[in-house]
Image: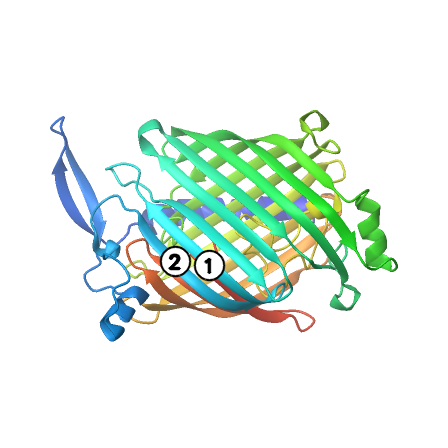
Amino acid sequence: MSVNYLINRVIIINIICLILFTKVYSKEENDSITVIDTSGQVKIKTEKKLNNQIDFIDVIHNTLHIKLRNDTAKAVGLGPFFSLLPAVGYTLVSGITGAITTSTSFYTDENKNKYSNILANVYYSQFNQFWTNINSSIFIDKYKVHFFGDWRFYKFPTYTYGIGPHTNVASALPIDYSYVRLYQYTYHEFFDNLFFGIAYNLDLYWDITTKVDTGKVYNEFIKNVKNSRSISSGFSANFLYDTRKNSVNPIGGTYVNVQYRPNLTILGSDINWQSMLIDIRQFVRLPANSGNVLAFWSYNNLTLKGEPAYLDLPTIGWDDYNNSGRGYVQGRYTGNNLLYLESEYRFHITDNGLLGGVVFGNAETILKKLSTELHTIIPGYGVGLRIKINKKSDTNVCIDYGLGIDGSHGFFFNLGEVF
């Protein structure tokens, strides 16, 4: 099976899902409110039903009688609706990790067409890893503009496992580096939910070191790491189609993001190279009259031309929110081209919305060239628990247990849905 065949089938499947399901299943359960605007036109506005819903903050308040908020979850308005979660968790890449994660959702206009959201997180692990990230998705409906940001800083001793789909954990190479990512996108909405835009993208690594100087993985690593630093810098052209109302926890809609990024030496990049990102997501309410969701995700990171530095190669777990590849340690599979598919079924456990669950499965492959035939598929699967932390923004704490091949397994934590 060729890569082009696979990509074509992915696109066809998502188009079919879009045609069949968007109009049928995307409607949310809301209370309708008739509003007459200043021009005399009648509009229908909606507010999500929250009367019978509770979240974790309600539980603390009702059981311990501790007031942790001015009940922003019940407020009718633009927000902000803020969630903060100090936590201790465990991941395969970082071991025991302390975290402070925050999610702030808000509307930017009275129409309340879409939530804007800012996720800001700080982490420190038992392996002396420190990292922080700020992900923002802000809609200015009045001007039909969407701003998206992905800013990160890492001081990150970790392991790399080599290039290709046939690596093994026993050959892991210890590495250390510091990293700054600065991605800032600006989109303009030309048609309903259809955006085109440009962005500046910077990946800067420095103090790249390893304590090992032999072995296959070391040879691959040192071949692409010319010195202790690397820079990839370039503007990108971006296409975005997004019908989701709430990006933190979509219960319907479609998301398509396509990015073409040329990295150029005239902008500070070490070498000229080009990449393309294709990110497609579909959300289907199933059954149609429930809050349960069947979700699909296709994530494809492709090298079109040139040879990226080792740490810039597409790798599992390094998508915008570090959520791909549940069942495997971050960075477990690396190569010139990453093809990734995932599906997840999200369901309510309690009628009041406090608890939910998921079952998920994913599959990925690593290809050196786009013309290479697809031979190796790497599967992952698992289950998860959802705990509602803020019922107004529909924000969940996600606790997943994933499994993969060769005995790979572990817990995965997130604030907001995985995709």
Q: Residue extending furthest right? A: 214
The one of 321 and 122 positioned closer to us in this rendering: 122
Q: Are marks 2 and 1 in contact (CB under 8 Å)?
A: yes
- Residue 136, position as x, y percentages in the image: 45, 43
Residue to which mark 2 is pinned:
84
For this view, does 36 lie left or right of residue 127? Answer: left
For this view, does 232 lie left or right of residue 393? Answer: right
The one of 350 and 374 positioned closer to us in this rendering: 350
The one of 213 and 357 positioned closer to us in this rendering: 213
Amino acid type, label 2: Leu
Q: Is residue 417 visible?
A: no
Tell me the CA gap for discs 2 and 1: 7 Å
- Residue 86, position as x, y percentages in the image: 43, 63
* Image quarter of residue 212: bottom right
Please tell me the numbered disc located at residue 177. none
In primary-sequence order, the first of circles 2 and 1 is: 2
